[in-house]
Amino acid sequence: MAKKEKAANLHIKRSAGDWVFDIAVIIFFFLFTFVCIFPFYYLLINTISDNDLVTSGRVNFYPMLKDAAGKGVLGAQFNNYLALQNVQDLGSSVLVTVARSVLGTALMVITSAWAGYLVTKQKMWKRSLWYRFLVVTMYFNAGLVPWYMNMLMMGLTDNFLAYIIPGMVAPYNIILVKTYIESIPSSLEESAVIDGASTLKVWLKIILPLSIPILATITIFGAVGNWNSFQDSLLLMNNRPDLYTLQHRLYVYLNSSSNLGAMMSQGGTISEQAAQSMLNQRVIQYTVSMVSIIPILLVYPFMQRYFVKGIMLGAVKG
Amino acid sequence: MDRTVNRKIPTETLPLGRRVPLWIFRATALIAGMAIFFPPVNPGRISEKINESASLFTTGVSYGTITNSMGRILRSQWIRGGDITLLMIACVTVMLGVIMCAAGGCMSLGNRKMRRRGLILPLLGAPIMGVGLFLIRQAYQRMVSNGEEMGKLDKIGMMLPGGFTVFIVLAALLFLSAAIAFFTAEKDTDPSAKMEMEEKYRLFLMMLPVILLTFIFAYLPIWGWRFAFFDYTPGGDIGADNYVGFKWFSFLFADPATTKDLIRVLRNTLIMSGLGILTSWLPIAFAVLLAEVRSTKFQRFVQTFTTIPNFISWVLVYAIAICIFSTDGFINSFLTNVMHVAGANTNYLQIADHTWLKMLLWGTWKGVGWSAIIYIAGIAGIDQQLYEAARVDGAGRFRCIWHITIPGLVPTYMVMLLMSIAGILSNGMEQYLVFSNAMNKDVIEVLDLYVYNIGIGQNRISLSTVVGISKSLIGITLLFAANGISKAIRGESII
């Protein structure tokens, strides 16, 4: 298609105005892309530079280490990342977040694959009622406090299961799977049924292998969602700091210093030592932030097509 | 080759008099099956020292959960470990009975033979539940007498929970309805018949766990709306004495402070959503401009990097905001060390000016690349012949954009626009929570954040519930309105 377009374009002479426009567009996109990735880069160089240079604000465009004379030269160190093992409560948060990302995503994907397959079965008793029953929950929720009270009643506060079980049924993902399965030729399934395969067997041997693309898509969405989860931890884990998710833990770290910052800006006095520890805390915050961004940055380029597929399928509603 | 699957299983319609007890039985079995996992109706919580959030299931399987606040009690033998083991056995027995009844309920959807077999299960299961409950009662009595012996009865907080009565009623109902259904059922006339179930019911039973999970986590919270009609304080009870009717609804307008808050919050919400709607064409512009770039490599490069911010959480966006805009962030150190501006140490995050605009910009930074994807795909789907024809007719690139590309994207845009209008009150709380501070809290607090702040922060459960209910109802009305508009204009629904 791109070739065709190019061929079509050959007929037209580009005017000077066209050239200016093209260049302006390219500059705009360069700038915008720069704005999108520079913060990540800046965060990264601040975590791998010499901490004194970071503190004095000298690290702006590339990672720096001190040379013999104490001047900043290009270089990198990873001590901040090693120092993270001493940061309080961080380990348990990473563990909890990894556990929920793996378990929660796996259960969500299995449930979506199962439910998405079943709702394509026209023969099910009251099928469309149950399907609507699921879909309505995308558009309607009872509100934050009733939801919280419900979780309290179910005993899911201060409980790791709260990260996994409520997320198992994801109506949007069920719709995605359903739409996808409907596009698989039904003759495949029919022939297996004639050969005596049970529903479970058809699902396992035919539907699952054929829907791997869509399952990959919802897996990646689910994993990112779990990794980024913050709100449920904030609401439900009041008495269990060891069950905070990574984002919640980071939020706590970020806030503990912004209070110090507020004191400063209001003209309150902070001792030299407190200011120093605050700035070190800043480096720790940056490093923790980087740790929670890195998995997404690593996974994203490889999975981009699945993300794109997800949003495109979502546009085709079920 | 086994072809039984395709053989039509004869359906029989039962007379009403035999259907009713069967349905009562199934419904009760369903309720009992769910009640196992409901902490409020745990019959095994015979002491106040047993965790309030433990369900019958947890009590049956987890010794640790029962005893986690009993350290001293167990050490000093005020409650003997043996009695707790008895309690656990009792709970498991009750569960066994319930599971038999639930299995019977499932089987009762089968053919005549299967239904008859299935109904035998509750006839055994309900008495087993009874035995289990008796054992719980036994454990209770042993603990009470032991406590009396030790003189510490007041320390171990013995009680017979409400769930105990609930389970007795459930067991009785299960037994009675199953017995009636069983004894009025027709005898097996064909001894060679197999146990089988119609496919529609089999499929339904496979779906049932998903339906139940949805019910528990998405519909059951509506039961929490009752707090709106009571003067509820956390940890307290609700009952006739603190029933206040619609007091909290009128409180929204009667209490000046609350009304003022509400107006402020609604202003913030509507302005920020409004700004979002006003700029909702930005992704289209992004997509159209990107399509004008000839190099597909460059397109892919831009697309990859501009969508990354969409996949990081708002907490991380805030972390990035700190590293760029705080006192020792990029802007200030750039000004100081590169531009040599003296005294550049403004913490831009603490400045409340233009908060709405800043929030919009953060939202745009995070979302525009991602939102553009759907339009980029839309442009790729436009028939190229249209462009060729237009060019032959002498149209330039801007006329092509205006008359072909944009009209091609309008249908998608309308759906997005209507959805965002329907969601005008829900802009989520995460973004505003992480960016809020002492300086900007008056202008940043949106409805969702307000509900969180008064409900969870200040423990005003009832008031917060009322605001939440109003929001949910207005939201669903707006959604239906948007859907109606969409149907009228485009002849297609959006939900």
Image (cartoon, coloured by chain):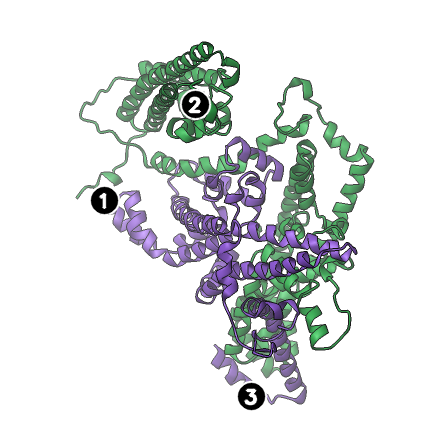
Chain colours: A purple, B green
Residue located beneath label 1 in the image: A196
For mark 3, does the 10 Å Cα neighbourhood hold few (<14), some (14 to 19), or many (20 or more) residues? Answer: few
Report the front residue among B449 and A130. B449
**Count of marks placed on residues:** 3
Residue at point 56% right, 70% down? A49
Residue at point 63% right, 28% down? B226
Q: CA distance from mark 2 to mark 3?
A: 90 Å
Measuring from the top left, give residue B314's x and y in whole percent.
Answer: 60, 55
Mark 3 and mark 1 on one chain: yes
Q: Amino acid at mark 3?
A: His
In front: mark 2 or mark 3?
2
Numbered mark located on residue B74 in the image = 2
Q: Amino acid at mark 1?
A: Gly
Residue located beneath label 3 in the image: A11
Residue at point 56% right, 88% down? A11
For mark 2, does the 10 Å Cα neighbourhood hold few (<14), some (14 to 19), or many (20 or more) residues? Answer: some
In front: mark 2 or mark 1?
2
